[in-house]
Amino acid sequence: MFTHVMVGSKDPERSRSFYDKVLGALGIGPSQSPPGAGRHFYGDMTKGGAFGVGTPAEGEQQHANGGTIGFIAPSSQHVDAFHQAGLDNGGSCEGKPGKREGAPGSPYGAYLRDPDGNKICAFAPPGR
């Protein structure tokens, strides 16, 4: 459905370091960066979607009010590693790892804010 999702960063290299570790904990990455572009991408938009972070083309960074970007985790252990990697690399907790009883199937997930304040999460399918 999507080619990519992009979030802004005031410091793309700090973001690359953060996301290389956080998404690396989910088996994604490392980033692929066009030389000098100030943007870093994870995944392959030609094969079903990519996530990008970089300097906003419009200049001033803004956050999506109520926006969250969710990543698939292979297991609850990967969710735990994602969350810990985020905390260890400049992110902040927006929801500790655990079952989400209000979500369909009660999946296991965790929420973070990246160093620029963008909200992300990782969820493992129920039973994993």
Image (spheres, grey):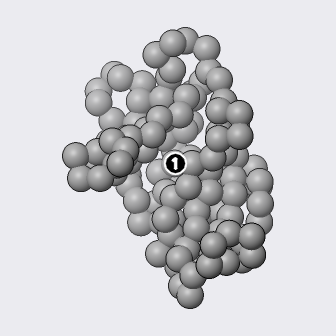
**Figure disc tally:** 1
For the point 29% across and 45% down, which residue is it? 45
The quarter of the picture where residue 10 lies is: top right
Residue at the left extreme? 46
For the point 62% across and 57% down, which residue is it? 121
Return the x and y of residue 31 as percentages of the image width and height: 38, 45
Give the residue at mark 1: 19
Q: Compared with residue 71, is residue 8 higher up or lower down, i.e. above or below?
A: above
Q: Compared with residue 10, is residue 80 higher up or lower down, i.e. above or below?
A: below
Return the x and y of residue 23 as percentages of the image width and height: 49, 57
For the point 47% across and 51% down, which residue is it? 20
Residue at the bottom extreme? 127
For the point 42% across and 25% down, which residue is it? 38
Return the x and y of residue 83 as percentages of the image width and height: 66, 63
Q: Compared with residue 52, is residue 1 higher up or lower down, i.e. above or below?
A: below
Return the x and y of residue 82 as percentages of the image width and height: 59, 64
Quadrant assignment for the C terminus: bottom right
